[in-house]
Image (cartoon, rainbow, N blue to C red):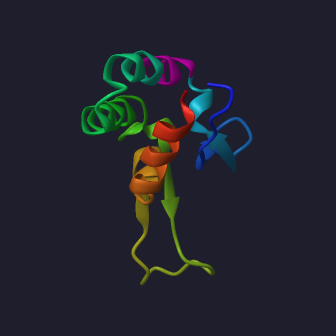
Amino acid sequence: MKNLHWFVYKEDINNNKIKIYDIFSCIAFSDDIKKDYKKYKNNFELFSERVNIYLRYYFWSKCECEIILSNWPPSDSFEKEKIDIYDQVMLNWNVFIKYVWDNIK
């Protein structure tokens, strides 16, 4: 989907850096959402559920989609948190799904 963009943080394992990643650059994810929009374009709730399923399938609990959050400067007393792309999108789920619904056309 060329007109949709949603940016998250993802590790670039080749350069050992955190980079900004557009989840809509995942062609399979974008195609699945487009297909379901055509099928559920009159039912926002069903479309929303389907998008959530695709987010979990493509971006949930996969090591290539996970980063570790820590404090700065690092300390052993701070509990580190592992988050994935799915978690990052879910932080703003209502905004995300409305954005997709309004702009997928």
Could you tell me residue 15's position as x and y percent? Answer: 74, 41
Could you tell me residue 73's position as x and y percent? Answer: 63, 81
Left or right: residue 17 compared with residue 52: right
Residue positioned 37% across, 26% down in the render: 41
Left or right: residue 89 compared with residue 41: right
Q: Residue furthest right?
A: 15
Q: Is residue 76 above or below residue 39?
A: below
Q: Is residue 71 above or below residue 67?
A: below
Nearer-the-camera pick, 94 or 20: 94
Residue positioned 42% across, 60% down in the render: 91
Q: Residue furthest front?
A: 42
Q: How many marks?
A: 0
**In the rendered image, which quarter contains the C terminus?**
top right
Residue positioned 56% across, 25% down in the render: 26
Q: Is residue 81 visible from the viewing direction of this image? A: yes
Nearer-the-camera pick, 24 or 68: 24
Dominant SS type (magenta): helix
Q: Is residue 17 visible from the viewing direction of this image? A: no
Nearer-the-camera pick, 41 or 30: 41
Q: Which residues are magenta?
A: 27-32
Q: Quadrant of residue 51?
A: top left
Left or right: residue 18 compared with residue 63: right
Magenta span includes 78: no
Residue positioned 45% across, 47% down in the render: 98
Could you tell me residue 86's position as x and y percent? Answer: 41, 45
Q: Is residue 102 above or below residue 31?
A: below
Nearer-the-camera pick, 104 or 7: 104
**In the rendered image, which quarter contains the N terminus?**
top right
